[in-house]
Image (cartoon, rainbow, N blue to C red):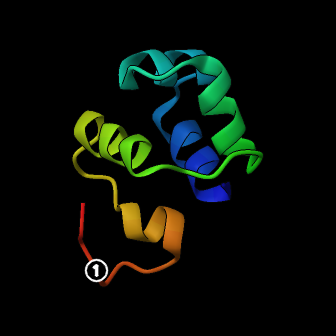
Amino acid sequence: MNGLKEFRKSTGLSQENIARKMGVSLSMYEKVERGNASVSRGFMQKLKKTFPSVSIDAMFFGSAERSDL
């Protein structure tokens, strides 16, 4: 998930810090960021709740036109 990594770096947070803020395990966060695990709806919802301005569609689906979450 290149978009996820870029977003995290833009926030200046480590993987551990962003995982803690989102309420997910570091292991799960790392797997999603590296593309070793599929991003779940729950993960996306937690990301959006933690960072309301983030575009889920742009980050994970390459589209900024939809706003489902």
Residue 37 in picture, x, y percent from top left:
69, 46
Residue 25 screen position, x and y as percent: 55, 18
Locate the N terminus and report the quarter of the image it occupies.
bottom right
| Horizontal side of residue 59 vs 31, given as left or right | left
Which quarter of the rendered picture does the C terminus lie within?
A: bottom left
- Which residue is depicted at the point 44% across and 70% down? 58
Asked if residue 20 is positioned above or below residue 56 in the image, the reply reads above
Q: How many numbered discs sit on the rendered protein?
A: 1
Please identify the quarter of the rendering in which residue 31 is found: top right
Residue position for label 1: 66
* Residue drawn at point x = 52 percent, y = 28 percent: 12
Dot 1 amino acid type: Arg
Categorize mark 1 by other alpha carbons within 10 Å: few (<14), some (14-19), many (20+). few
Q: Does dot 1 land on a helix, a strand or a loop?
A: loop
Between 25 and 55, the one lying in front of the other is 25
Where is residue 61? Give x, y as percent: 51, 73
Q: Residue at x 52, y 24 (%)?
A: 13
Residue at the extreme bottom of the image, as rendered: 65
> What is the quadrant of residue 65 in the picture?
bottom left
